[in-house]
Image (cartoon, rainbow, N blue to C red):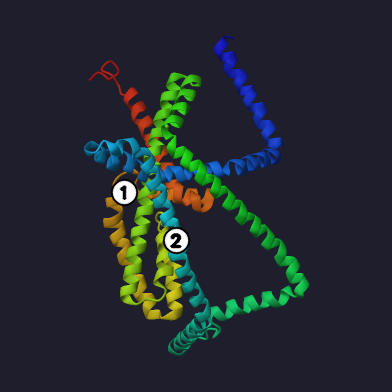
C-alpha cells in the first residue's frame, strides 16, 4: 500500500468517526453552534452593514474625491475619512427618515385603519351578502348567507370565550411574554450598537483586513486551492454586490412610483400600501404577489372599485418595472434565466424563509456560474483530437 492510498483511507476513517460522533451528539453540537452564533451575531451584522455601505463609500473615495483631488490636492489627504463620515451620515439620514418621518406616518395610517376597520368590515359584509343573494336568485342556488368575515369573527369570539380565566391568569400569561420581548429588543439594540462600531472598523480598515486575510490563507492553503478560493470569492462579491444594490434601488423606485400613483388616483392609505409594495418587491418573482394581494384586499374592504383600479395599476407598474426599470438597474449582472430565479427563490425560501428568498438568487448565480465554467472546461478537455476521430 503506497503512501497516497494510506492517507486516503486514514482521512476516510477519520471522517466516518467524526460523522458518527456528530450524529450521536447532534443536540449538544447544535447548542454549541447556536451559542457561538449568538456571540458573533454583532460581528455578522457589522460585516453585512459594512458590505452594504461599501458601495457609497467606494463611490465617494474612488470617484468623487479622486476627481476633486485632481484639481485640489488638499482633498486627497482627507478623501478616506471624509468618505467614511459622509457614508455614515447618509446611512443615519436614511434611518432618521424612517424613524422620524416614515414610521410616524405609517403609525397614523395603521391607527386610522384600526379605527375604521369595523366600518369597512360591515360595508364589505353587506356587499358580500348582496352578491350571495344575487347568485342565489339568478342561479337558483342556496348558498350560505354567512359571509367570510362573519366566520372569522365567530372563530375569534369562540377562542376568546374558550380561553376563560380572570385578571390573574391574564397577567400570568402576558408578563412572561412582555419580559421575553423586552429582553429580545434590548438584545437587538445591543447587537446593532456593536454592529455599527464593527462596521466602521471594517470599512476604515478594509484594505488591511483583506490583505491580512489573503496572506493568511495564502500561507496555509495549497497554491491551486488558494487561487480557486480567490476566484470564487471574487465572483461571489461581484454577484452579491450588484444584486443587493440593484434589488434595494429597484424596490425604492417602485415604492416611490407606487406612492405617487396612488396619491394621484386618490386611493386610501397610499403610504402604508406603498411601503408594503416596496418592502416585498425585494423578493424576486413572488414579491409583487406577497405585497399586492393583502393591499388589494384592504382596498376591497373600503371600495371595490378602488381595489379593481389598484390591481390594474399594479399590473401596469410591474410591467414597467420588469421591462424598463429593473433591466436598466440590474442589466445582466445575475446571469441566470427566469426559471432558475424562480427555482432559487423557492428553494431558498423553503430552507431559510425570507432571507433565503432574498439571498437565494445570488447564491444560486454563483453556483450556476462555477458549474458552467467547470462544464466548459471539461468539454474542452474531452474534445476528440485528430487521432481520436474515426476514419472515413
User: Which comes sooner in the sequence, label 2 or label 1?
Assistant: 2
Q: Which mark is residue 98?
A: 2
In the picture, the quarter occupied by the N terminus is top right
Instruction: Answer whether residue 164 is visible to the viewer in this image.
Output: yes
> From the viewer's perspective, is 15 left or right of 112?
right
How far apart in space, not on screen, are marks 2 and 1 (Cα)?
26 Å
Image location (x, y in percent) of residue 228: 42, 26
| Residue topped by disc 1 | 330
Q: Secondary structure at mark 2?
A: helix
Residue 214's spot in the image, x, y percent? 45, 26
Circle 2 Cα neighbour tier, 10 Å, few/some/many (<14 / 14–19 / ≥20): some
Above-or-below relation of 144 to 390: below
Residue at left 52%, top 80%?
115
| Of 86 and 353, the residue lying toward us | 86
Picture quadrant of residue 322: bottom left
Along the horizontal axis of the image, is 117 left or right of 382? right
Q: Dot 1, how many residues are within 10 Å of its Cα: few (below 14), some (14-19), or many (20+)? A: some
> Can residue 340 be seen at all in this image of the molecule?
no
Q: Could you tell me which residue is drawn at 42 percent across and 46 percent down?
A: 361
Residue 165 rendering spot, x and y as whole percentages? 76, 74
x, y percent for residue 61: 33, 40
Which element type, helix, strand or loop, lies under badge 1? helix
185 or 13, which is in the foreground? 185
Residue at (67% x, 58% y) in the render: 180
Viewport quadrant of the C terminus: top left
> 340 above or below 166?
above
Q: Nearer the viewer, residue 119 or 361?
A: 119
> In the image, which disc is placed on residue 276?
none
Amino acid at each position: 500500500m503506497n503512501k497516497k492510498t494510506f492517507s486516503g483511507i486514514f482521512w476516510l476513517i477519520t471522517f466516518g468517526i467524526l460523522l458518527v460522533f456528530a450524529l450521536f451528539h447532534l443536540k449538544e453540537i447544535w447548542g454549541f453552534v447556536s451559542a457561538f452564533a449568538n456571540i458573533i451575531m454583532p460581528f455578522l451584522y457589522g460585516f453585512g452593514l459594512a458590505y452594504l455601505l461599501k458601495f457609497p463609500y467606494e463611490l465617494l473615495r474612488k470617484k468623487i474625491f479622486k476627481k476633486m483631488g485632481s484639481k485640489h490636492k488638499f482633498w486627497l489627504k482627507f478623501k478616506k475619512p471624509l468618505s467614511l463620515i459622509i457614508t455614515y451620515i447618509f446611512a443615519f439620514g436614511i434611518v432618521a427618515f424612517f424613524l422620524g418621518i416614515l414610521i410616524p406616518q405609517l403609525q397614523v395610517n395603521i391607527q386610522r385603519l384600526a379605527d375604521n376597520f369595523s366600518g369597512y368590515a360591515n360595508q364589505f359584509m353587506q356587499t358580500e351578502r348582496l352578491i350571495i343573494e344575487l347568485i342565489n336568485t339568478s342561479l337558483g342556488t342556496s348558498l350560505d348567507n354567512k359571509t367570510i368575515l362573519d366566520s372569522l369573527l365567530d372563530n375569534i369570539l369562540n377562542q376568546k370565550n374558550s380561553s376563560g380565566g380572570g385578571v390573574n391568569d391574564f397577567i400570568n400569561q402576558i408578563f412572561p411574554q412582555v419580559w421575553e420581548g423586552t429582553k429580545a429588543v434590548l438584545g437587538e439594540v445591543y447587537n446593532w450598537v456593536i454592529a455599527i462600531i464593527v462596521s466602521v472598523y471594517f470599512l476604515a480598515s478594509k484594505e488591511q483586513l483583506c490583505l491580512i486575510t489573503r496572506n493568511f490563507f495564502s500561507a496555509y492553503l495549497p497554491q491551486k486551492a488558494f487561487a480557486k478560493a480567490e476566484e470564487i470569492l471574487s465572483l461571489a462579491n461581484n454577484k452579491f454586490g450588484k444584486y443587493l444594490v440593484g434589488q434595494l434601488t429597484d424596490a425604492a423606485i417602485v415604492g416611490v412610483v407606487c406612492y405617487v400613483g396612488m396619491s394621484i388616483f386618490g386611493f386610501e392609505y397610499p403610504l402604508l400600501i406603498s411601503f408594503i409594495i416596496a418592502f416585498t418587491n425585494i423578493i424576486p418573482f413572488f414579491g409583487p404577489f406577497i405585497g399586492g394581494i393583502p393591499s388589494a384586499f384592504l382596498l376591497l374592504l373600503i371600495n371595490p372599485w378602488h381595489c379593481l383600479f389598484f390591481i390594474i395599476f399594479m399590473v401596469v407598474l410591474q410591467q414597467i418595472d420588469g421591462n424598463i426599470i429593473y433591466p436598466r438597474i440590474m442589466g445582466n449582472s445575475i446571469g441566470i434565466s427566469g426559471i432558475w430565479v424562480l427555482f432559487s427563490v423557492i428553494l431558498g425560501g423553503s430552507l431559510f424563509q425570507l432571507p433565503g428568498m432574498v439571498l437565494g438568487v445570488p447564491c444560486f448565480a454563483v453556483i450556476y456560474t462555477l458549474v458552467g465554467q467547470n462544464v466548459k472546461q471539461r468539454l474542452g478537455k474531452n474534445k476528440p483530437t485528430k487521432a481520436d476521430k474515426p476514419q472515413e
